[in-house]
Image (cartoon, grey):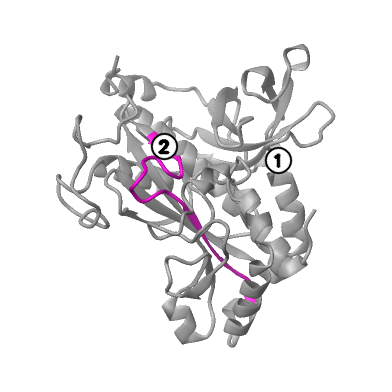
Amino acid sequence: MALNQLLLKHYHDLDQHGKVLATYIWIDGTGEGLRGKTKTLDKTPSSAAELPVWNFDGSSTGQSSGHNSDIYVKPVAIYKDPFMKAGNILVMCETLKPDDSPAETNHRDSCMKVMERCKDEKPWFGIEQEYTLMNLEGHPFGWPKNGYPGPQGPYYCSVGADRAYGRAIMEAHYKACLYAGIKICGTNAEVMPSQWEYQVGPCEGVSIGDELWVSRYILHRVCEDFGVVCSLDPKPLKGWNGAGAHCNYSTKAMREDGGIDVIHAAVEKLSKKQDQHIAWYDPYGGKDNARRLTGQHETADIKTFSSGVAHRGASIRIPRQVDKDKKGYLEDRRPSSNCDPYQVSEALLRTTVLDEWP
């Protein structure tokens, strides 16, 4: 049953009498799903450090047992709430066990420690988040009920009701992210109809994870308003392009004159750690990505490392302009659409800067 969203505006316009609604967001026990709940504050905090640590029932999110269920949520980043507005906020949180150690799917803690060790490298990240719109029955949004649309080709960066399925959802998400303060820097229709992409970055250090996770929360909420579902499945349909989260990565040395040599050295290091990266690049140790990284549909084979200039079928692509300028960044095309950006960014630094794996 669809609710009339227009009725909600009346209630959003009501006076809050100076109170602030803070929606705490966290990653659940799947390492992929997001959860959230809201509390009332007396004033708007100036930083996440001013917010209280809260808790939730971890036995209902796959993060604890019923006889010891409390999991803590520790605020780490604040964004404007594009849904409640009126000074209300979204709060990205870490999850902690009762002994204050990180919960199993809290990869931010480890990422932050690596970022701190590598801070002099000034690592920048940009992630291209692909997603697929589905109806409530699990069928791609806008597709014929008893068949398929025409073959891939006319849908990428397309325009027209017969080619671009769900543009209103994409545009609503784009504007909501900008309002929230997310560093969303672009968007486009993807190769498979009803599939879209947006880009977050450049972000320095651990903030790439905070920004991408909150942008995903906003995307799910926007889709909720439109009565559709956002799927981050890396391969929603066989025979069609999958969905990834390509990560553009650079260090200060890569961005300076002569940085192409540093990029090539990083690619060489990455070639020797294929298995470790694949295991970290989707929440299920590579099992989800195995359906996507087949060597077809603009992907490299999951078992084989490859690289090349402007090569979209490679594990690592060096953009044409980077090769021409002899400095810039590399694109890791292996992360799945449901990856944890904290793990992706940490893995890149572990291999290319620290030469160290746990």
Q: Which residues are magenta?
A: 230-252
Tell whether 55 sits left or right of 179.
right
**Residue 223 location (% of width, % of height):** 36, 33
Q: CA distance from mark 2 to mark 1?
A: 33 Å
302 on left or right of 221? right
Badge 2 vs badge 1, beta-carbon distance below 8 Å: no
60 left or right, relative to 81: right
Q: Position of residue 154 (x, y in %)?
A: 20, 56
Is residue 173 part of the magenta span, yes or no?
no
Q: Is 242 in the magenta?
A: yes
**Residue 258 in the image: above or below residue 140:** below
- Look at the image and tell me in which quarter the N terminus lies: top left
On the image, which quarter does residue 266 sit in?
bottom right
Is residue 338 visible to the viewer in this orientation of the structure? yes
**Residue at point 77%, 12% (across, down):** 67
Q: Secondary structure at mark 2?
A: strand
Say which quarter of the image contains residue 101.
top right
Residue tagged by mark 2? 231
Q: Main secondary structure of the magenta part?
A: loop
Going from the N terminus, do you reach mark 2 or mark 1 first? 1
Q: Of the residues shown, which amino acid type is indicated by label 2?
A: Ser
- x%, y% of residue 172? 32, 41
Q: Residues within 10 Å of mark 2 (few under 14, many from 20)?
A: many
Residue 49's tag is 1
> What is the three-letter code of the residue carrying label 1?
Ala
